[in-house]
Image (tube, rainbow, N blue to C red):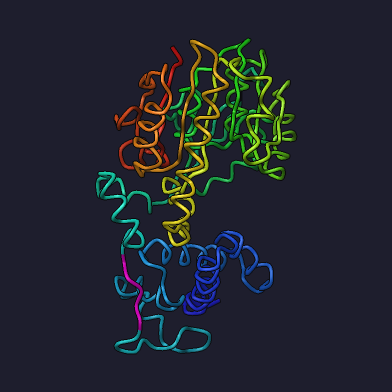
Amino acid sequence: MTPGARVQAAIEVLDLVIAAARANGAPADRLIGDWFRTRRFAGSKDRRAIRELTYRAIRACGEVPETGRAAMLRVAAEDPELAALFDGNGHAPATIVSGEPVAEAGLAPRWLVERFAASEVAEADAMALLDRAPLDIRVNTLRGGRVELPEGGERSLAAHGWRYPPETSIEQSDAYVHGAIEVQDTGSQLTCEAVAARPGETVIDLCAGAGGKTLALAAEMENSGTLVACDVDRTRLSRLAPRAERAGATGIETVLLDPNKEVQALQRFAGAADAVLVDAPCSGTGTWRRNPEARWRLTEAQLARYVTVQARLLDIAAGLVKPGGRLVFVTCSLLDEEGASQAEGFLKRNLGWQAVTPQLPAGTPRGPGLRLSPWQDGTDGFFVARFERL
């Protein structure tokens, strides 16, 4: 493909991404993969170039663009070489016309920018959310012995973490195939460290999803004790079993929850857990480095629903913790309503609890917990708070 044809292809992909964002459809990475599968003429260099152009345009636009062309014109406005490819020759995009729509630059839709400002997120922290994320891994201590890690990595802030360039093909390595490493953001690893799970304890991962954090907890517990992974999503929770087998994590109990019936399903654990992790559903504003189009999907109504669910899950978790036990609350968000304000609300509603700042090698104090950010800490954006029952 010619350079101009690659630009036109990226515009077509962007049209699909924009439509999906408005309709809450498939994520960008899936749409890009589907587009390539039906266009076998695109070689590996073409695919890489089109993908890079697509994500470059997504990151450049704050509000949802009118069209893929408007999004790409936003990039072209700052890149004369790219603008020159709009010449209409062959499969290249048509020549740029004065006054045609150009997408607006910025961090995110205006209402979200206002929420970031209200949460006192520094501009550098906010804009770093649009950078490319590195590839982080966690060495799986359950496999033991010396692990032959892929070349090109360096130690991260996490106890068992390593960091690689974003384009690293880690899943092809022997270490990954044999379960010696797991792909996991450094911030995610640190939030697991905040739980301080120990062998022999009873630990509940209340919102386990596909089990990434569950596996980290299993390693800390050395496959000893009771580890319970819960979620309301049957499909996601079903992915934990094969992952656990590959990682050598044994004895994990899974509990499929019915929404609004969680207390009944977990009654046998009431007041019995040493630790409960609540990695709550949230806006995902801290993960934009990996899913930049997600900022076009979020609405104020959705955010309000997340906040309500988080509060309910925290109160459910409180009933599972025994005296002297701990509750760790995590969201991958930089917004106070999903972080510091949510943690403060928990303490007001639940007497007999105290906040204890997690002892982590990263994070900035924010309310009763810590905020982790790409700019300050090199991680995805997170809020983490640790509460102890008196």
> Which secondary structure dominates the residues rendered in magenta?
loop
Residue at point 30% right, 89% down? 98
Q: Is residue 259 above or below residue 276?
A: below
**Where, quadrant-wise, is the N terminus in this rendering?**
bottom right
Magenta stretch bounds: 101-105
Q: Name the foreground residue: 362 vs 21.
A: 21
Residue at point 69% right, 20% down? 268
Whether residue 102 appears in magenta in the rendering, the answer is yes
Res 173 → quadrant: top right
Q: Is residue 359 above or below residue 214?
A: above
Q: Position of residue 372 (x, y in %)?
A: 36, 35
Whether residue 214 appears in magenta in the rendering, the answer is no
Q: Position of residue 228 (x, y in %)?
A: 66, 25
Count of numbered tags: 0
Q: Position of residue 198 (x, y in %)?
A: 56, 13
Res 175 → quadrant: top right
**Where, quadrant-wise, is the C terminus in this rendering?**
top left
Residue at point 34% right, 89% down? 97
Q: Name the foreground residue: 251 vs 328.
A: 328
Q: Name the foreground residue: 61 vs 315.
A: 315
Q: Position of residue 201 (x, y in %)?
A: 60, 12
